[in-house]
């Protein structure tokens, strides 16, 4: 994945400008920053849902576009409404090729094999055939990970996949993503407010604040000096028992 001179603006408001970013195969990059800094907009642009205001983008060897089969997407965890007539295995199946795999399609066997393989990757065999509204939030999110993996993506885009999950499930989802990139060489761009569950896993951090950004390893970016410069106010970064605590930045920034 490659961005060159990327600028995204809505009217007079510029989210970021001059962004150069390369994410190599198998690399895990976390995207951090306060609400409204353009983290989700970055993913929407890579998914082809919105266009850059300036610059260029290449993802999985082609320009960003809707429905790129080489790009997997994991959304935020959302509890399914009661009464939704959808099983976990059905949700995962949508990640293979949407609704185009009809009953008469000659590749039904391949489709079943891909769905089964994706479910096995996240260890969801025991509950994949249960109705989604009967599953816990963590189980549902594991199936969303499987849905994103079912198409065998070269790039995996994750939009706050740890939101509303307890610590154990945050670690589980993070480890599933990490295993995927290590075993299959998938490039990962991981938007999160929760840096600590992924801190031991990430290679680099992209930190966005009010039109400014910094890219580097966690040790290079997650410092009092760098964050104070980005926020233009005093920010303290403290390590407590292997966890990062950011004090002084906008709530939810990291």
Image: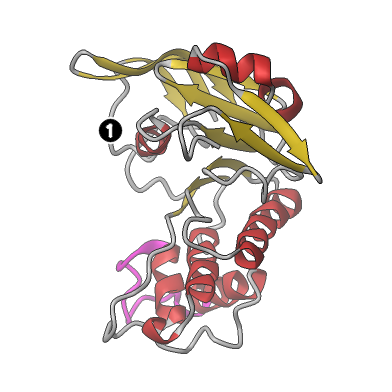
Range of residues picked out in magenta: 97-109
- What residue sits 35% from the left and 31% below the top? 36
- Quadrant hosting residue 248: top right
* Residue holding disc 1: 50
Q: Nearer the viewer, residue 5 or 185?
A: 5
- What residue sits 57% from the left and 27% below the top? 206
Q: Is residue 236 left or right of residue 151?
A: right
User: Where residue 212 appears, x then y in whole percent?
Assistant: 46, 14
- What residue sits 49% from the left and 17% below the top? 231
Q: Nearer the viewer, residue 153 or 249?
A: 249
Within the magenta stretch, is there residue 161?
Answer: no
User: Where residue 202 appears, x then y in whole percent?
Assistant: 70, 39
Q: Residue furthest right?
A: 241
- Quadrant hosting residue 50: top left
Quadrant for the C terminus in the image = top right
Main SS, magenta region, reads loop
- What residue sits 61% from the left and 84% below the top? 125
Element marked by disc 1: loop
Within the magenta stretch, is there residue 100?
Answer: yes
The image shows residue 118, relative to residue 152, as above or below, that is: below
User: Where residue 223 appears, x then y in whole percent?
Assistant: 69, 22
Q: How many marks?
A: 1
Q: Is residue 78 left or right of residue 187?
A: left
């Amino acid at each position: 994945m490659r961005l060159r001179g990327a600028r995204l603006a809505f009217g007079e408001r510029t989210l970021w400008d001059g962004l150069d970013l390369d994410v190599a195969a198998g690399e895990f990059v976390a995207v951090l920053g306060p609400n409204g800094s353009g983290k989700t907009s970055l993913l929407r642009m890579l998914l082809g849902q919105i266009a850059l205001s300036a610059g260029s983008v290449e993802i999985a060897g082609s320009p960003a576009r809707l429905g790129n089969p080489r790009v997997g997407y994991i959304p935020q965890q959302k509890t399914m409404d009661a009464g939704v007539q959808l099983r976990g295995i059905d949700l995962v199946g949508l990640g293979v090729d949407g609704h185009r795999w009809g009953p008469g399609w000659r590749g039904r066997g391949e489709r079943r094999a891909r769905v089964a393989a994706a479910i096995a990757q996240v260890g969801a065999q025991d509950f994949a055939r249960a109705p989604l509204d009967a599953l816990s939030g963590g189980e549902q999110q594991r199936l969303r990970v499987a849905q994103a993996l079912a198409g065998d993506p070269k790039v995996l885009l994750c939009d706050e996949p740890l939101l509303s999950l307890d610590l154990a499930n945050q670690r589980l989802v993070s480890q599933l993503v990490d295993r995927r990139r290590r075993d299959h060489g998938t490039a990962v761009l991981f938007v999160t407010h929760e840096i600590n569950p992924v801190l031991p896993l990430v290679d680099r951090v992209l930190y966005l604040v009010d039109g400014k950004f910094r890219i580097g390893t966690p040790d290079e970016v997650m410092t009092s000096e760098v964050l104070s410069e980005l926020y233009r106010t005093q920010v303290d970064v403290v390590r407590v028992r292997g966890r990062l605590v950011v004090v002084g930045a906008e709530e939810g920034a990291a």
